[in-house]
Image: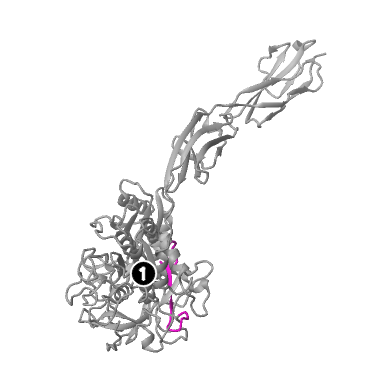
Amino acid sequence: MRRHVWTAAVTAGLLLFGLPAPLAHADGQADPGQTTIVVTVEPHQGDPAAAASDAITEVGGEVTKVVPITDTTVAVTVDATTSQAEQLGEAAETQDGVVAAEPSRKVYPTSTDDTLYDYLWDLNNGADSTYGVNAEDAWPTSTGTGVVVGVIDTGITAHPDLTASSSAIVGGNVVAGYDFITSPTSAGDGGGWDDDPTDEGDYHTENGTPVDSSWHGTHVSGTIAAIANNGRDIAGVAPDAEVQPIRVLGRDGGSDYDVAAAITWGAGLHVDGVPDNPTPAAVLNLSLGGGGVCPTSIQTAIDGAVAAGTIVVVAAGNDGSPLSTTFPANCDHVVNVVATGHDGTRSWYSNYGTASVPATVSAPGGSASSGSDGDYRHWIWSTWNSGTTTGGSPTYTGMIGTSMAAPHVAGVAALVKAADSGLTVAEVTDILTSTAKASAGCSTTECGAGIVDAAAAVAAAGHVPSPPPSVAPTLESLAISGSPIVGSTLTASASVTPSDASLAWQWTISGSVVSTSSSYTPVSADVGQDVVVQAVASHDGHSVSQTASVRISSAALSLVSRPKATGTFRVGHKVKASKGSWSPTPATYHYQWYRSGKKISKATKSTYKLTRSDRKKKITVKVTVTLPGYLTASATSSSHKVK
């Protein structure tokens, strides 16, 4: 690579993280009395939009708009303030079929400032720094060919070092993407979701001060896949990979449910009302963030993407705070990236890992640990646009931030996937962490495994052993032992191979799950019902199941000690029955007194007053007991002769 000195306009920006905010109406005017609640419903519902809307309506919400995102995620707009929406969401979460109902939160770019920069220390390990990602040494083996990296950001502008054109946003190293900004005001293009991810500019006014457009997505894209050896100024980490711009950030940041839709679509999964992605991304880069815990909608989208084989790379955030305070960096199953500077230390602005949410890896984000922006030559240089509001001419500039660190890792992941397309998300993540080099003076909890090393990672990709052939499990001899009566424990057993296959259990009655262990003890309500146990054996991604069933019958009550008749057995005296003891304890007791084996009329209490008719007769008492789920039982006392 030739090195150049560039000049570009210096711009300034502020890092902001998401807060709950209302959507905009279709006419572009925001209504402060409306808030969007992102409702996550259980899968396999016939009409998830109706289920979500009904759940909000049931708890008193006045629904004005319903936008289905996926088959489990629905954006429901209500006439309510943010605090009212929080209360509606909490109430809706108690409804059947609702997993979560959370007021929408904003997300914003995680970059901070931009300035000039004239040395690509972040791509190589030259004399000026040994803390770059060592991409140049990886290029003889892998340049990212055939790998699509989705950039979920502000969209993209035409740039000859990306699109090979100064007017088209598709071409060169850029494939067709999508615009997922719902709000027309934020999008600046007069519409909602569409197939044009052009960055219209995110200029806005903040506290009365104009803030110029950041062209954030263009800068991030250049770090990943700017074209090399084309006579232009820079190259990306993976110069032959393809960027897919997926627009979610506009003039007022972005909405978490738009981000959830973008993640889902980028991974090649279906989003309602949108054509499926013809070129699903192997890697997704999210250089954005919002404050608070990870929303259920975004976690669900990430889980789906990872399950589909897509690596999700996320910027740590620029608050100088723990990763736990910022989503999606605190979401599960992501590769979160801490920013390091030219000297290998954690950059002063970068969020960092803790025991609760440790960092995954680090990468160059620019600046250093001193708390100042430092030499602009130590920032991250990439593609940009000269426009201060709407688009101008293609140019270059430097920026710092974890937004700049994340695309370095996304680019290295693309190099690794190009070296071996069969690697799983877990395997790529393991390669990134196991080959990383230590950052300077930063623990693995705070900065992750270290600064990613492209050359070492690509070399490791060529030595990942092929997994052994998958083995499907077999399941035999499923049986239920124990008496199928109330109170008696039933135990299921089965023979499964191979020995390391997992075995799961599920007991159901009339379709309802009553136990997920290998045993179940029937209760009284089960009498007359068929209890079904299903055994599921799993191994190497294969599973097999069998079922067995028994019908539950009533059990017998056990007599522990017989009833007794006590007192003075003489005419005119009152005698008393003791009920005896039983196992388990009966619910009801009934008494019947007998005279020489014959029932005494109306003598059905626990006490009986002896009459002349009883003289010289034998008196006994019979106690009858009942308990739901058990057979009715009775026992008779010893006899006593009346004097």
Residue beneath label 1, please?
410
Q: Secondary structure at mark 1?
A: helix
Relative height, residue 78 to residue 614 (above, below): below
Quadrant of the rendering where the N terminus is positioned: bottom left
Q: Position of residue 161 (x, y in %)?
A: 24, 77
Which picture quadrant has residue 297?
A: bottom left
**Most common secondary structure along the magenta stretch:** loop
Is 338 inside the magenta-drawn segment? yes
| Count of all numbered marks drawn on residues in the image | 1
Query: Residue 68, image x and y in percent?
Result: 29, 55
Residue 255 visible in the shown view: yes
Q: Residue furthest left?
A: 167
* Image coords of residue 306 (percent x, y): 38, 58
Binning the other alpha carbons within 10 Å of mark 1 as few (below 14), some (14 to 19) or many (20 upward) gives many
Q: Which residue occupies the foreground of this view, 588 or 533?
A: 533
The amino acid beneath tag 1 is Ala
Expressed as whole percent of the image width and height from the top left, the position of residue 344 reads 46, 81
Task: Give the extent of the magenta segment.
Answer: 328-346
Specify whether 609 is left or right of 19: right
Residue toward you, 443 or 22: 443
Residue 152 drawn in magenta: no
For residue 461, side relative to residue 449 (left or right): left
